[in-house]
């Protein structure tokens, strides 16, 4: 059984969950990527308790996913801007969103669609081989031991 943390797990997914696995975290990052910046905007969007939101925002700043920027000095007020680290989660967020659209959508269909600004087409994430450039399906992917796993055993 997994404990409250994944410190003993030698797994990149477990390490990622230590950062983004809390219930509100990916929703806050989603909202930040959609352009929300201020505490009240996040609270209105999510309906999360103020103390929980305060803690999650502080943790996201500490982990380098959001940048806290002062936009008013008297009184001091801050906004939260997504960093490159947060933007790197877009593919994972879209994968979760598209999975939800296919397997958990409501009767009205998906709440959002992914639109390519350049041509208006729908954007989908894909698995692509870095060597040959071929798009591959899940059945064509093997998970092999990497250096961290082989180093820990030898």
Image (spheres, helix red, strand yellow):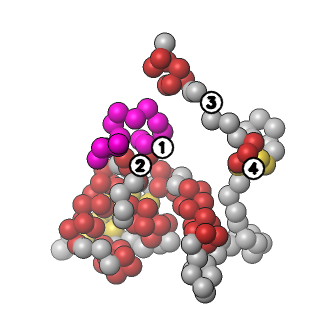
Q: Quadrant of the N terminus?
A: top left
Residue range corresponding to the magenta coloring: 1-15
Instruction: Look at the numbered discs 4 and 3 and tell me whether their residues touch, using CB distance below 8 Å.
Output: no
Q: Residue at x 57, y 81 (%)?
A: 106
Whole-number angstrom distance, CA of label 4 to CA of label 1: 20 Å
73 left or right, relative to 141: left
Instruction: Look at the numbered discs 2 and 4 and tell me whether their residues touch, using CB distance below 8 Å.
Output: no
The residue at which mark 1 appears reads as: 13
The residue at which mark 4 appears reads as: 137
Whole-number angstrom distance, CA of label 3 to CA of label 1: 14 Å
Tag 1 or tag 3, which sits nearer the N-term?
Answer: 1
The residue at which mark 3 appears reads as: 144
Whole-number angstrom distance, CA of label 3 to CA of label 2: 21 Å
Tag 3 or tag 4, which sits nearer the N-term?
Answer: 4
Tag 1 or tag 4, which sits nearer the N-term?
Answer: 1
The residue at which mark 2 appears reads as: 17
Tag 4 or tag 2, which sits nearer the N-term?
Answer: 2
Q: Nearer the viewer, residue 113 or 80?
A: 113
Alpha-carbon neighbours of circle 1 within 10 Å: few (<14), some, or many (≥20)?
A: few
Helix or strand or loop: what does disc 2 sit on?
helix
Whole-number angstrom distance, CA of label 2 to CA of label 4: 24 Å
């Amino acid at each position: 059984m997994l404990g409250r943390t994944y410190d003993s797990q030698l797994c990149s997914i477990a390490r990622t969950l230590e950062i983004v696995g809390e219930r509100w975290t990916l929703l806050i990052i989603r909202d930040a990527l959609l352009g929300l910046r201020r505490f009240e905007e996040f609270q209105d969007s999510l309906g999360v308790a103020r103390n929980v939101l305060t803690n999650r925002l502080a943790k996201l700043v500490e982990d380098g996913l959001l940048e806290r920027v002062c936009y008013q000095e008297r009184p001091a007020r801050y906004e939260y801007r997504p960093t490159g680290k947060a933007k790197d989660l877009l593919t994972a967020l879209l994968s979760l969103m598209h999975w939800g659209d296919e397997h958990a959508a409501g009767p009205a269909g998906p709440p959002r669609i992914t639109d390519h600004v350049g041509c208006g087409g729908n954007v989908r994430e894909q698995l692509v081989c870095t060597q040959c450039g071929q798009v591959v399906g899940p059945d064509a992917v093997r998970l092999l031991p990497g250096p961290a796993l082989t180093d820990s055993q030898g």
